[in-house]
Image (cartoon, rainbow, N blue to C red):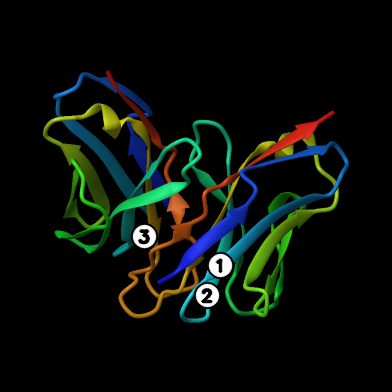
Amino acid sequence: AQSVTQLGSHVSVSEGALVLLRCNYSSSVPPYLFWYVQYPNQGLQLLLKYTSAATLVKGINGFEAEFKKSETSFHLTKPSAHMSDAAEYFCAVSDDGGTSYGKLTFGQGTILTVHP
Amino acid sequence: SQTIHQWPATLVQPVGSPLSLECTVEGTSNPNLYWYRQAAGRGLQLLFYSIGIDQISSEVPQNLSASRPQDRQFILSSKKLLLSDSGFYLCAWRRRGGNTEAFFGQGTRLTVV
């Protein structure tokens, strides 16, 4: 079975400050990991994905994430927050093994607030 | 390029009324299809997934059902809505075979009154 835990349902930062959103996963096989962003009343948009190549993954809008197998983590970072980064962020895991049928399991989400 | 359409965007329905939400995918064939429900502060809950026409699997027991009458069409239904069915419903598709992301529709905000 696979699962995702996002630490912190709300994160607040100042504009220009570092953004760090935490994600820990559990998977019985090597995982595929994803970060999505959601703006109010919209669908989810992919920020970046880890698919067993480079452990440091760069995504859109200046975000990146590092896969750390020893810590079972996939934290999302951005060096300098922008007001437009305010949204809800979801971490997701898929093992695509056995009979999972490509199901993505999502964390509970983290709402990012950016203050001027 | 591939696109996913989901409609309607918003829906207000009385308790006990039927429901039909539709999702279609363009630009790909034989996708895996998914229905998720999102409640505030509770992340995304997978409701149904499908690996082919008329092949539907349910993740949780509920008042809803799903059908896939065509390869790229996925329908979420209910015969009688409950208040607890209110939420934001998202359709998604994914290519077979592993390390690809899921692509989401714009969602349907369902309010049962």
- Determine contact: label 2, label 1, CB under 8 Å: yes
Residue A31 circle label? 2
Residue A25 circle label? 1
Give the SS element for disc 1: strand
Q: Amino acid at mark 1?
A: Tyr
Residue B28 circle label? 3
The quadrant in which the N terminus of chain A is found is bottom left
Give the SS element for disc 3: loop
Whichever of callouts 2 and 1 sits on the residue coming sooner in the sequence is 1
Q: Is label 2 or label 3 in front?
A: 2
Question: Quarter of the image holding residue B34?
Answer: bottom left
Q: Amino acid at mark 3?
A: Thr
Going 74% across and 55% down the picture, which residue do you hit?
Answer: A63
Residues indicated by labels 1 and 3 sit on the same polypeptide chain: no
Question: Could you say where residue B31 lies in the image, as x and y percent from the top left?
Answer: 33, 62
CA separation in Å, label 2 and label 3: 25 Å
The image shows residue A88, relative to residue A78, as above or below, that is: above
Q: Is residue B11 left or right of residue A37?
A: left
Q: Is residue B49 left or right of residue A64?
A: left
- Determine contact: label 1, label 3, CB under 8 Å: no
Q: Amino acid at mark 2?
A: Pro
Give the SS element for disc 2: loop
